[in-house]
Amino acid sequence: MASDRPVAYTVYRDERQLPAIIALLEADLSEPYSIYTYRYFIHGWPSLCFLIPQGSVDRGRPIGVIVCKLDEHRGALRGYIGMLAVAPACRKRGIGSQLVRWAVDAMRDQRADEIVLETEAHNEKALRLYEQLGFVRDKRLYRYYLNGVDAFRLKLWTGIRLPTIDPQDGVEAEANKTAR
Ligand SMILES: CC(C)(COP(=O)(O)OP(=O)(O)OC[C@H]1O[C@@H](n2cnc3c(N)ncnc32)[C@H](O)[C@@H]1OP(=O)(O)O)[C@@H](O)C(=O)NCCC(=O)NCCS
């Protein structure tokens, strides 16, 4: 239900948040990252690390996190979603989608031409989430991960507006149509 949808987020502020962020992310990673990889992303682009805390926005441990970067790639400004995770107990409530929307909006505000990410080719949940938000499968990357699993590179061209996935919107749109 739309009312379950989280509305409050915070962005990364300092190193004290890092252990809880890493714990959430590494529970489901396809391959281990070093602390330097986390720091590269999060310290390099703190405004593109969105956290949904449990409880107080200032102090709660994160139940959802998205980590991104934005830089030049072949003459374009490319946003990159490096990591995304939602705590298992909090999944299927729209949190993952909301995190992606915030990140996409922030990168679009910073004039990203495109936004890309890789996900395991068999990660149906992630593929569906991103495709519902307008990302398309750009490439299959064979044996991309250390465990030998293939990945899909997904891409969003930011000129395209994100569709809404609120089921209530569909109901309202139908109701408006028949009211006319
Ligand atoms: C992939 C992942 C981030 C999704 O997070 P999530 O918060 O469950 O995602 P959402 O709730 O936005 O969407 C997932 C599903 O919940 C549904 N949903 C969204 N809001 C809902 C609500 N209010 N009530 C019921 N279902 C809802 C969505 O329609 C979607 O269903 P579908 O996949 O059947 O279409 C999460 O499963 C995860 O952390 N996985 C491990 C890490 C990972 O795979 N990361 C991605 C690698 S790039």
Image (cartoon, helix red, strand yellow):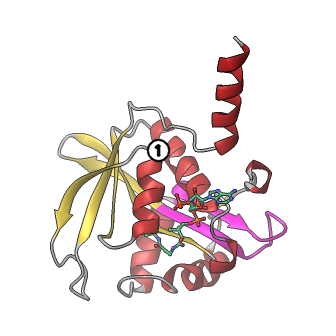
| Residue at the limit of the structure toward the front, as seen here | 178
Magenta range is: 46-67
What residue is drawn where x is 80% and y is 65%?
58
- Classify 10 Å Cα crowding around label 1: few (below 14), some (14-19), many (20 and above): many
Q: Tell me the quadrant of ligand 1.
A: bottom right
Disc 1 marks a residue whose amino acid type is: Met
Residue 124 visible in the snapshot: yes
| Residue at the limit of the structure toward the right, as seen here | 56
- Would you say residue 64 sits in the magenta stretch? yes
Q: Is residue 23 left or right of residue 149?
A: right
Q: Ligand 1: does it lie within 8 Å of the C-beta at label 1?
A: no
Percent x, y of residue 91 = 63, 70
Q: Is residue 41 above or below residue 164?
A: below
Q: Is residue 60 left or right of residue 26?
A: right
State the SS at label 1. Answer: helix
Residue 82 visible in the snapshot: no
What residue is drawn where x is 54% and y is 71%?
85
Name the foreground residue: 112 vs 160. 160
Percent x, y of residue 69 = 41, 57
What residue is drawn where x is 49% and y is 64%?
67
Q: Is residue 99 above or below residue 108?
A: below
What residue is drawn where x is 73% and y is 54%?
5
Residue wearing tag 1: 107
Percent x, y of residue 121 = 29, 70
Q: Which corner quadrant of the image does residue 122 belong to?
A: bottom left
Percent x, y of residue 32 = 38, 88
| Residue at the limit of the structure toward the top, as seen here | 180
Quarter of the C terminus within the rendering:
top right
